[in-house]
Image (spheres, rainbow, N blue to C red):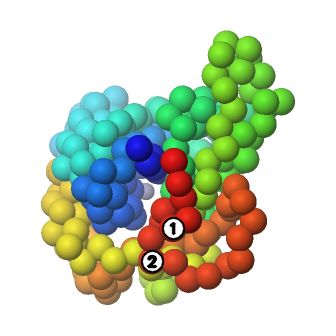
Amino acid sequence: MLRLLCVTAHPDDEAGAFGGVLARYSEAGVECSVICLTAGERAANRGGAANDEALKAMRCKEFDVACRHLGVSHCQVLDYPDGALDRADFHAVTGHLIQAIRTQRPHVVLTFGAEGFVTAHPDHGMAGLFTSAAFQWAARAGRCTAQVEQGLAPWHARKLYYVTTEFSLPERPTVSLPPVTARIDISAYIQRKNEAFACHTSQRVLQPVFENAQKRAGEHELFHLAATAQVTPMQMESDLFEGVTE
Ligand SMILES: [Zn+2]
């Protein structure tokens, strides 16, 4: 069975940035997992929550529902501090992700680039940096050796992709986006993506903004191939699993 792991920063990223491919590949029989590094407790939109803890609980539930709606098999919130991933312990976060990669053994890993995607959110960029290191280090027996001693074998995931776009948002900080190397047709899954975003009821006010951005993005989700287990010439892809075998 083919497996995909997506690493995000906030509940709603899985729907907003990756919803189309998660729905598409889940439906195609790929086992999809999502790890979200924060519970999104510092969000500007509070959903009526009395405090950060209450919002955290609310958003974790919304994340579960959205992931289920997208067909994701495993989803997890790691509860690192929202809005402060640049101050999280690099060794701790990458260790967590390395353990997840060695346990779940994904063939394809998806995350953000260091720019933070179209919103330029530093947490998105940090999720990408942590995941990029973990993707490499999970394959090396000499990294996080305690895991290996406990019987967790190194795992060399085949491909690492950063989500990207072909437009920028003038109201957001400047970003330098990774060039598009994969265009994935999500035309059959746009409705499901919108519905998954709507599962984040605490973020309801963002729904029209999200749906407008989705219209502008069109019928594809775009990715940049950032690393491969086997050296291959760069070519435009229409399938994230192109060339990947079990
Ligand atoms: Zn986010």
Q: Position of residue 245 (x, y in %)?
A: 53, 54
Tell which tag, 2 or 1, sits nearer the viewer. 1
Q: Is residue 190 above or below residue 10?
A: below
Q: Is residue 126 above or below residue 178?
A: above
Q: Residue shown at 66%/66% (left/top)?
A: 226
Q: Residue shown at 67%/44% (left/top)?
A: 156
Q: Position of residue 188 (x, y in %)?
A: 20, 73
Q: Please, what is the three-letter code of the amino acid marked with disc 2?
A: Ser
Q: Residue shown at 47%/86% (left/top)?
A: 167
Q: Are marks 2 and 1 in contact (CB under 8 Å)?
A: yes
* Residue 22: quadrant of the picture: bottom left
Quarter of the figure that contains the N terminus: top left
* Residue 151: quadrant of the picture: top right
Mark 2: few, some, or many residues within 10 Å (few <14, many ≥20)?
some
Does ligand 1 reach within 8 Å of label 2's beta carbon? no
Mark 1: few, some, or many residues within 10 Å (few <14, many ≥20)?
few
The residue under label 1 is 242
Element on which disc 1 rests: loop
Q: Please, what is the three-letter code of the amino acid marked with disc 1?
A: Glu
Q: Position of residue 238 (x, y in %)?
A: 45, 77
Q: Is residue 127 above or below residue 224?
A: above
Q: Which mark is residue 238?
A: 2
Q: Quadrant of ligand 1?
A: bottom left
Q: Is residue 15 above or below residue 7?
A: below
Q: Is residue 214 left or right of residue 83?
A: left
Q: Which mark is residue 76?
A: none
Does ligand 1 reach within 8 Å of label 1's beta carbon? no
Q: Is residue 245 left or right of residue 67?
A: right
Q: In front here: 201 or 17?
A: 17
Q: Position of residue 37 (x, y in %)?
A: 49, 41
